[in-house]
Image: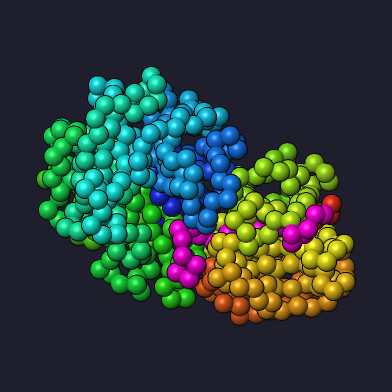
Amino acid sequence: MKTFTNPILPGFYPDPSICRAGDDYYLVTSTFEYFPGIPIFHSKDLVHWRQLGHVLDRPSQLDLDGVSPSKGVFAPTIRYHEGVFYVINTIVGKKGNFVVTATDPAGPWSEPYWLEAEGIDPSLFFDEDGRAYYTGTRPVREGEAYFGNWEIWLQELDLSTMQLTGDTYSLWRGALRDAVWPEGPHIYKINGYYYLMISEGGTGPDHALSVARSQQLTGPYKGYPRNPFLTHRHLGQDYPIVNVGHGDIVETQDGEWWMVLLASRPYGGYYRNLGRETFLVPFVWEDGWPVVKPGKSIVELTETAPSLPEHRWLPPSACDQFEGGALDMQWMFARTPRDTFYSLDARKSYLRLKLRPQTLSENANPSLVCRRQQHMDFTARTRMEFTPRAEGEAAGMALLQSSQYHFRFETIQVDGRQYVQLAKNQDGQEEILARQPYSSDVLYLTVTAHGQDHSFYYGSTPEEQTLLASQVDGRILSTDVAGGFVGACLGMYASSNGKDSNNWADYDWFEYTGV
């Protein structure tokens, strides 16, 4: 019997949504303050995924200017209907809810169709008569009696105008009396019933999946008597998989039912540096209700694989040599890039980052090119050429959870001298953990992580690197210290720290390997 290892998308890939078009499966996840927004993945077997691109890859589609950490792109849903792919989502802290469309999931995707829709976590449902409906979550109509007192609601979407029309309907407030944060709703029609699946309990240890059904789309909906039908809240914080929730389901062409959902893998205690990741579990229908893995009803690190033919993709290289005409799909920016601060053309086979006044500590778009941390144990290396010319000019590597929680491993000019240093920003407070004089314009930087213990090495050759700092506690890179909804990222950055500059840093390559 074939098995696979969870998560199917390790690292910061939360709020997964899935759809099937023939024998092909497509999946999207949230990206919050990072640009481009909403990575889209393709699979043939539900286990092995390759990224096709991003749904929101143009500044005209995605305004993230000034958004706070963990605001921005929330909970997209992807659906396929009559040859067209639809993605609907919310930009929290900006204009709200919108839909984009494409006939090819690899893009290009349309400009946004903005909706007059209250709340967050929108989803789309296409009924058998071809009519489309919006469902989302919003505060209860009579006014919130307590924090998180929200409800799931529904309204028709006119596909000819891409605008909401007609009456709105309150559908459900969750399985528990006084439920908090009923969210992430999805509607499905199966065997004559409309099923409404939601998450509730918040995205922490009490996260859970519940389901209700009705013979009418607009309700009333009756909850499953055994709700929540999937949760890990009862397993405690020492269980290796926690905060299970926010699922979406799909039926294979072989008639099997599978669910993608988010969960986290804490380590070094209840610390979730990797953020919320995408997992896969099977389920069956019993008496008209979903039952996840009968006899267990939990998510595990090793699962029995779907009956679909295995289809592996060529894995991406661990080392990016920056030889293409565009950045690889793994790379992201913090917020929408309005300036051209990076180049792959200025120097062949190098990534050039311009020094700009923006810093990692601001809710801005700094000169940062980063990727997700995807392993508890990892090594990241780069070769950089950079000489600071003025006070405060700096470039190097960054490990970040947010603008207020990060490490900077950098070369910097201080009092007219050049140093290599490790700086920590925790709750907005700056601390220099280690600093040594360094004069070469070539710098190799290496970061190793063994669980929450991080070590930082530097040198002018790859063979001879000096330990700058060891056993540096990485827990500040967890949501449990920093708050918010994202996972840790790492990459290359450059800054002139508040001053104008015409300087730059060149990166020859960047390598990330994990265990």
Residue for point 80% across, 63% down: 393
- Residue 368, by quadrant, is bottom right
Relative to 142, is 85 above or below?
Answer: above
Indicate whether residue 492 is drawn in magenta: yes
The magenta region covers: 479-501
As rendered, which of 326 and 411 lies closer to the eye? Answer: 411
Asked if residue 500 shows in the view, the reply is yes
> Left or right of 66: which side holds 270?
left
As rendered, which of 313 and 487 lies closer to the eye? Answer: 487
Colour pattern: rainbow
Asked if residue 45 shows in the view, the reply is no
Relative to 359, is 150 above or below?
Answer: above
Indicate whether residue 85 is drawn in magenta: no
Residue for point 38% across, 19% down: 160
Place of residue 379 in the rendered image (x, y in percent of width and height, measured from the top left): 63, 66
Place of residue 154 in the rendered image (x, y in percent of width and height, measured from the top left): 26, 36
Residue for point 33% across, 66% down: 205
Place of residue 63 in the rendered image (x, y in percent of width and height, measured from the top left): 56, 41
As rendered, which of 302 and 344 lies closer to the eye? Answer: 344
User: Across the whole image, how many numbered discs are drawn on residues?
Assistant: 0
Could you tell me which quadrant the C terminus lies in?
bottom right
- Residue 116, by quadrant, is top left
Relative to 225, is 165 above or below?
Answer: above
- Residue furthest out toward the front: 143
Place of residue 178 in the rendered image (x, y in percent of width and height, measured from the top left): 20, 59
Residue for point 30% across, 46% down: 138
